[in-house]
Amino acid sequence: MTPLGDRRAHARLEVVGSLVGRLEWSEFVRALDISTTGALVESPVPMAPNSRQSLNLLIGGEAIVVEAHVRRLERRPRDNNQPAYLIGLEFASPPQRLVQWVENLSSGRAEGT
């Protein structure tokens, strides 16, 4: 097999010092438990402990974004030998709409479940 060679169209520049970057991707998770202060979710991929994550929740047709901190991570095998992870999340500042929905859910009055 012959190497493809350098196919870059533009020159690359050397970075001197530190350069801050951000990598994002979305993954669907299943909520197992939720409260006004956090949630327990099952995910096909792990999240770094103590990391900050953005959650996009769909409640009653309305998208709500909440920032959360990963407080617990536990690997759980599934029946099909694919790993699953239980992730405990603590909400940083839950929006009032989310707090209201969880309180209504606990009293049996929540819509959009």
Image (cartoon, helix red, strand yellow):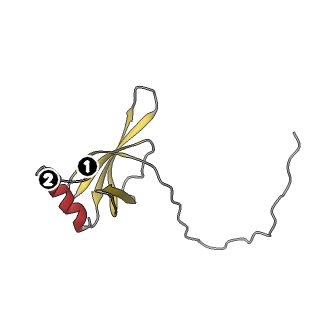
Across and down, in percent, residue 28 comes to 42, 48
Q: Is any part of residue 68 visible from this angle?
A: yes
Q: Nearer the viewer, residue 30 or 101?
A: 101
Residue 101, image quadrant: bottom left
67 on left or right of 14? left
Above or below 18: residue 31: above
Residue 44, image quadrant: top left
Residue 109 circle label: 2
| Circle 1: residue type | Thr
Residue 113 circle label: 1
User: Which quadrant of the figure contains the N terminus?
Assistant: top right
Across and down, in percent, residue 64 comes to 33, 63
Across and down, in percent, residue 2 comes to 89, 43
Above or below 16: residue 82: above
Residue 93 circle label: none
| Circle 2: residue type | Arg
Other residues around mark 2 within 10 Å, as few (<14) / some (14–19) / many (≥20): few
Residue 52, image quadrant: bottom left
12 on left or right of 52? right
Q: Secondary structure at mark 1?
A: loop
Q: Nearer the viewer, residue 26 or 104?
A: 104
